[in-house]
Image (tube, helix red, strand yellow):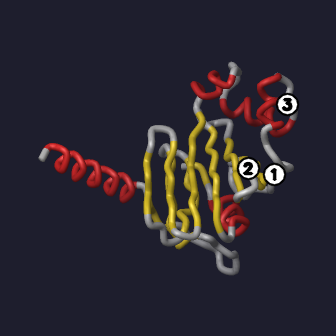
Amino acid sequence: MKTARDIIVLLIMVLTIHGCQTNNIKHEAGVERASTGEELILKGRVSVPLPESYKKVLLDEHAMIISAPEYSVVYRWIDQNEVEFIGSNKSPYDFFKSVFSNPTSDEEKRFLEGLKNEVHRPNSPSDLEFYYFDNGDGRQIYILSNILSFVLEVTYKGDDDNKYINSVVADSQLR
């Protein structure tokens, strides 16, 4: 009986958290979107487009996974503790900015060598910086800002990965 009660409480918490983190976004006409016009606000600071018609949402201390039969998206926030675990004493922003622009330390060079393909930096209409690459199964994008205490990593696997990444770049913003 206690297990059933715990499962019900957990489901209510997940639905409440999910309900609190979605809002409508204004979209400009003529731009191809991968989302349904809703947004997902991660760590209360970064708004990204919510993917279409998902079947499952899994929430972890450092990540959120949204999945459907035709795709999955993993949102992972990388904080100071994780950067220190990698071996750097830089802030998350400074570490990843250096990795993608001018890696100097061994940790930064090893991180960049682990990426299989060329990293692209699209122009952004917001105060966020984006770096993305093809990771073999889909696309991975890093979202940075010097005013955040974390870096957001978004991994999209499935159909229309380019469409979703373009939507993230066009519609993501600081909160």
Q: Residue furthest left?
A: 1
Disc nearer the start of the sequence (2/1)? 1
9 w.r.t. 97: above or below: below
- Percent position of residue 7, x then y: 24, 50
- Picture coordinates of residue 118 (x, y %)? 86, 49
Q: Cα distance, mark 3 to mark 1?
A: 15 Å
Which circle marks residue 130 in the picture?
Answer: 2
Q: Are marks 2 and 1 in contact (CB under 8 Å)?
A: yes
CA distance for labels 2 and 1 = 6 Å
What numbered label is drawn on residue 141? none
Of the residues under marks 3 and 1, which one precedes in the sequence?
3
Residue position for label 1: 121
The residue indicated by pointer 3 is: 103
Outermost residue to the bottom: 30
Question: Residue 155: x percent and y percent?
Answer: 64, 53
Residue at horizontal 53 percent and vertical 63 percent from the top: 50
Q: Residues within 10 Å of mark 1 (few under 14, many from 20)?
A: some
Name the residue at 17% across, 48% down: 5
